[in-house]
Amino acid sequence: MLEIYNTLMRKKEVFKPKNTENVKIYYCWPTVYNYAHIGNFRAYIFEDVIIKTLQFLGYKTNTTMNITDVDDKTIRESQKAKISLSDFTQKYTDIFLSDIEKLGIKKADTIVPVTSLIDEMVAMINILLKKWFAYISDDGSIYFAINKSQNYGKLAHLDFSGMKNSVRIDNDEYEKETASDFVLWKAWKSEDGENYWEKDFLVGETTQMLKGRPGWHIECSACNLKYFWPEIDLHMGGIDLIFPHHENEIAQSEAVTGKKFSRYWIHSGHLMVEGKKMAKSLENFYTLNDIEEKFHNVKKEQLFRSLRLLFINGKYRESIDFSFAKLEANINTIEKIDELVKRLAMAEKNNSKKWVKKEFREQLQYFIADYIKSLEDDINTPEALSIFFNFISFANKELDTKNMSSDEVKSSIDFLKTFNQVLGIVDFSFLEENTIPKEIQAKLEARNSAKQDKDFSLADSLRDELLSLWYKIVDSREGTRLEKI
C-alpha cells in the first residue's frame, strides 16, 4: 500500500486517487527564457520517479505539464535577443525537451504552452470577477482578493498575524511575509512591447476590454481546468513553489469550482552545491551543457545516468548536495552497473544450462518484495537503490561461481529491467548482438593465441592495433570480448 507525504496535511498518507485507472497528475515545468539548470533537473527527475513508481505499482496515470512561455522574464530576454517572443521561447522549449530526454525523463502525456490557454485564463478570471473573488485596479490590472478566500494559506501554513500590510502585488514571485492580493491579469506597460492581448472582462453587468497579459499563477489553474476539470489527484513541484505559486493556484481554482483542487501535494527539496545555494554570483550555477563540458571525456549517456543516480540517491523531500566529486563517484558506480550487464550478456551467450536453483529463486523474491516495500514507503529511493545494489553484488557473486544457468542469467536481466522501470540508470544496449567484423575477430583470436604462447610482445602489438581500430579487449571471468570504443 503506497504512502506519500502530503504537503497539505504535513504527514504521510495512504495514496487513494479518485480512480486508479485514471490518476490525474499535474506538475509545473519551466519558464523557457534560458537553459534549465541542474537544480531544475533535480525536481524534474523527482517528478519522473514519482510517476514511474505509480505506474510500476499498477496505477494508470494521466499527466499534464505546462510550459511558461510568457512572463516578465521571457519578454525581457526575448527583447534583449531581438527576436519574437514565440521564436525565443520555442528555442528554449526545444532545448529543454532535448535535455529531459537525455536524463531519461519521460514527457508528460500533455504538454501545454500557456500562451495557448489565454481564452481559458480569461474565462476563469471572469468567473472570479463575477463571484467577487477578483477586482479590477485603476491601471486595468486584475487582482485576486485573498481575504475572500476562507482557506488561503493552508498549503504554506501561513500565519497572517506576522504579515506586512500591503494592498496588492503584481510580481510573480514574492515572500510569505508580503502575502497580498496577487495579479491575475497584468495591464500592458510600454516595456511589454507587442506582447499583449486585448480581452473582454466583466465589470458589473457590462464588459470592458483590457489590454495586457496573464499573471503567472492563473496559468496552471487554467491548464488544470481545461484538461482535468474540476479536481486532480496529485500536484507536484519543487519546494520553492509552495508559496506563492501553489498557494495561489489553490485559492483561485477552488474559488472557481467550489471543490478541492488537488487531493495530494508532493514537493521536492532544494539542490545545494557543496553546501551552498546555487547562484551565478557564487559561480556554482550549472546547466547540463556545463556538466557535459566538464566531463567531456565521459560518454554522454553514461554521464546523464550518473547525474540521475546522484539525484535519486537522496530522499526527494530533503535537500541534496551536488559536487563534481560526488558526480565522479556516481560515474564509477554506473560503470560497475554496466560491467554487470556486460557480464550477463557474455554469460547468456556462452551458457546452455536450463534450471533455476531454489535458493536463487527465493533470493530474487526477497529482493523484489523489499524493493516494492521501499517504494511504497513514501517512494524511498535511497532504500530502493540499496536493495538494487545488493542485487548487483548477488548477481556478480553468482557469476563468479560459474554455476549460473542460462535461465538464471535471463532472470537476472529481467530483474534489472524491473528495477530500471523506476530508477532509469541501466543501459541494456550491451545485451544487443554486436557483430564484430571477421578481420577484427581474427586479430583478437591471434592475440589470444600469442598470449597463450607467452609471446607477450606480439599480444601487446595486436592489442594496440585493435585499439587503433577503435576496439578494446576486455578480459573477464566469462572470457575475452571486444568492445567498440
Image (spheres, helix red, strand yellow):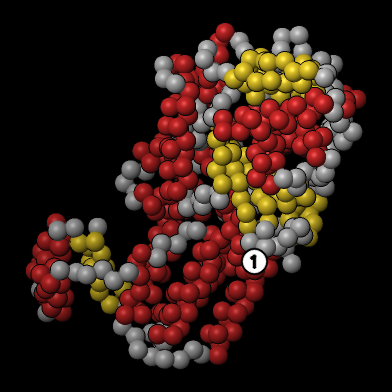
In this picture, residue 19 sits left or right of residue 71: right
The residue that disc 1 covers is 57
**Quadrant in the rendering for residue 180:** top right
Residue at 14% from the left image edge and 56% from the top image edge:
468
- Residue closest to the far front: 206
The residue at the point 22 percent across, 70 percent down is 435
How far across and down, in percent of the image, does residue 124 sit? 73, 31
Q: Residue at x 72, y 49 (%)?
A: 232
The amino acid marked with disc number 1 is: Leu
Q: Nearer the viewer, residue 240 or 181?
A: 181
Q: Compared to 32, does 373 lie above or below? A: below
Q: Position of residue 318 (x, y in %)?
A: 67, 46
The image quadrant that residue 431 belongs to is bottom left
- Residue 436 shows in this picture: yes
Q: Is residue 10 left or right of residue 61?
A: right
Q: Is residue 436 above or below residue 231?
A: below
Q: Would residue 217 be seen by someone viewing this image from the given angle?
A: no
Query: 101 and 346: which one is in front?
Result: 101
> What is the quadrant of the N terminus in the image?
bottom right
Mark 1 surroundings: few (<14), some (14-19) or many (≥20) residues within 10 A: some
